[in-house]
Amino acid sequence: MDDRLGIQLPFLDKDWHEYGLTEQEGIVAEWEIIRGHIPDRIKELEVSINSRQAQLDVEENFERSCELNSEISELASIINDLWIWYRTNQNIIEEKIHH
């Protein structure tokens, strides 16, 4: 489980080609299930961003405004990383495993 992204990430303890076809298919099937949850996770983060932007619109305290901007930036970074993982397909999954 990746706490920052809020999803499980694949972890393989050996090179992709060292797994048998059945194991590879199982890994890919499990990844597709996880991958299917990424858009929902992104929507959750977008709600958080929108909430912070609304707070920022009325915030008069400069320090708190900076905090909100920082939080928004981090959430946007997480969304970007989630999209990268979402686009990861079964042919390149082994390149992303050790990320």
Image (spheres, rainbow, N blue to C red):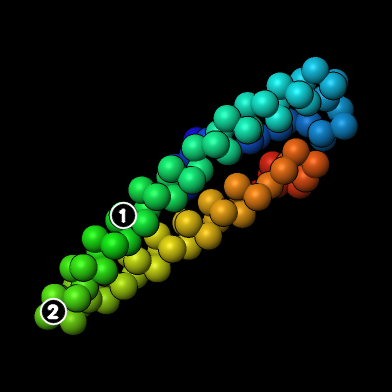
Q: For this view, does 80 lie left or right of residue 17?
A: left
**Would you place residue 13 above or below residue 44 in this image?**
above
- Kind of residue sitting beneath label 1: Val
The residue shown at (58%, 38%) is 35
**Would you place residue 15 above or below residue 86 in this image?**
above
Residue 61 location, quadrant: bottom left
Number of dots carrying numbers: 2
Q: For this view, does 80 lie left or right of residue 20?
A: left
Give percent across and percent down for residue 64. Answer: 19, 73
The secondary element bearing badge 2 is classed as: loop
Q: Nearer the viewer, residue 46 or 62?
A: 46
Residue 3 can be seen, yes or no: no
Q: For this view, does 81 lie left or right of residue 70?
A: right
Q: Nearer the viewer, mark 1 or mark 2?
A: 1
The residue shown at (80%, 41%) is 91
Q: Nearer the viewer, residue 47 or 62?
A: 47
Instruction: Tell me, for residue 47, which label it has, or none.
Output: 1
Disc 2 crowd, CA 10 A, few/some/many (<14, 14-19, 20+):
few
Give percent across and percent down for residue 29. Answer: 67, 26
**Would you place residue 89 above or below residue 26 in this image?**
below
Give percent across and percent down for residue 16. Answer: 82, 34
Residue matched to label 2: 61
Residue 49 can be seen, yes or no: yes
Q: Earlier in the sequence, mark 1 or mark 2?
A: 1
**Would you place residue 51 above or below residue 67 in this image?**
above
- Kind of residue sitting beneath label 2: Asn
Q: Compute the Cα span from label 1 to label 2.
A: 23 Å
The residue shown at (35%, 66%) is 72
Residue found at the far top of this picture = 22
Residue 40 location, quadrant: top left
Q: Nearer the viewer, residue 86 or 73?
A: 86
Q: Nearer the viewer, residue 33 or 61?
A: 33
